[in-house]
Amino acid sequence: MEELLLSRIQFAANISFHILFPTITIALGWVLLFFKLRFNATGDDRWMAAYMFWVKIFALSFGLGVVSGITMSFQFGTNWPGFMETVGNVAGPLLAYEVLTAFFLEAAFLGIMLFGASRVPNWLHTLATFLVAFGTTMSAFWILVLNSWMHTPAGFELRDGIVHATDWWAIVFNPSMPYRLAHMLLASGLTVAFLITGVSAYRRLIGDRSKGVRLTLKTGAWMAAILIPIQIWAGDMHGLNTLEHQPQKVAAMEGNWETSSHVPLLLFALPDEEKRQNDFEIGIPNGASLILKHDPAGVVPGLNDFYAEDGTALHPPVAPVFWSFRVMVGTGVLMLLMSWTTVIMMRRKGGVDGLNPWLLRGLVAMTFSGWVATLAGWYTTEIGRQPWLVQGVLTTEAAVADVPAPMVATTLAAYLIVYAVLLVAYVTVMFRLARKASDGEDTRPHSGAAQVALVPGE
């Protein structure tokens, strides 16, 4: 059990670090394409200034995403050999599709996107930006296909304990895939929106009054204000899908022990798995029933329905799922309030110049709020799948390698140290780029393009 817990923590640390960067590159690629197209259409130098600053952040994020993805993939063999042994006939091809349709595309055109503005025609540079953005999205598509299949497996049969694919359409378009994909793409969009808004607000606070910064702050704020209501709707649909296919996860998210109607939405509680009850509950009457069933009298499943005859829990750990879900939702509410407040203030005050310093500081504080919400959401969905690695097919315990606990602990400590250093360096470089950005506009689309991703000065 100690080896299992340490291996789970190690993989969680790896994937938590890794997901930070694709969460940025997926949406930032499309934002860069938007900047480029607007520059092409209007000739307005502000759009190119925005492109040339944010493409540096894209390059930095892309590089760390690739490096962390490689180390994460090694763990399938070192810590979780049972995964590929059992479901490799499905997981292997899906991961190969990602490489063939996404990674090669990104690798082929990333150099043109970063360094080709003065070396290739403008249409080709624009096309390269589009293909890189498309590639990052395709990468997310295939990874989320596999992840969704692990939650709602379909299109396969078990023979001698090994999964064999029988219907690839059912595998790819498994019951939870559309909801999980939409939820993640919107999460990426919100992460980038608040990143752009926060960094732009920081530049305003340190005295940058360039037109490009005003434009990016406005763009990020409107992007966040538009996406957050859509994300709330997508999250609701995803929750209903989860209720249908993984009711034990929803019961843990709600901290609900008894299947009943008129279930309150708990704002605060301390779940006690030994006593099978919550302490210090604070809730909204009928709230959970209304959200999950769209009926205040709706029946919500309880955790006590998910115990084996011998008393073994067949539901996930309650407290981590319960609290990570509330962190995700709470962060989303803050995003809604901040983005709408910013947009309203801009409309009332005549634009970015009218924003108060306190609001700008609030936006800076929310710079990485998308990361917080994304990680909390992933903890909710992945811990909520336990004790299964592949729902109903393969348990987490059955897939783990027999690696001595001290060895796992040592490598875990090494990973944590390296990732902490890299994360601090990433944030430091990002804000160093922001500080070094001058008030002038770096709009050189046809000169000095090799400096786009490497030179911090704007």
Image: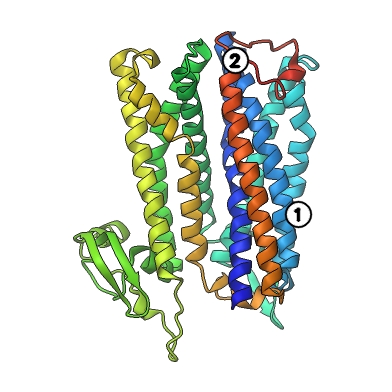
- Within 10 Å of disc 1 (Cα), the crowding (few <14, some 14-19, many 20+) is few
Q: Position of residue 36 (x, y in %)?
A: 62, 20
Give the distance between the C-alpha atoms of the residues marked 1 and 2, in whole angstroms: 37 Å
Q: Position of residue 177 (x, y in %)?
A: 54, 56
Kindly identify which numbered label has been placed on residue 49: 2
Left of 445 or right of it: where is 30? left
- Depth-wise, is mark 1 or mark 2 nearer the camera? 2
Kindly identify which numbered label has been placed on residue 83: none
Residue kind at label 2, given as amino acid type:
Ala
Q: Earlier in the sequence, mark 1 or mark 2?
A: 2
Q: What element carries label 1?
A: helix
Q: Is mark 2 on a helix, strand or loop?
A: helix
How has the structure been colored for display?
Answer: rainbow
Left of 79 or right of it: where is 370? left
Residue kind at label 1, given as amino acid type:
Ala
- Residue, disc 1: 96
Q: In which quarter of the image is residue 122?
A: top right
Visible residue check, residue 179: no
Q: Residue furthest bottom?
A: 310
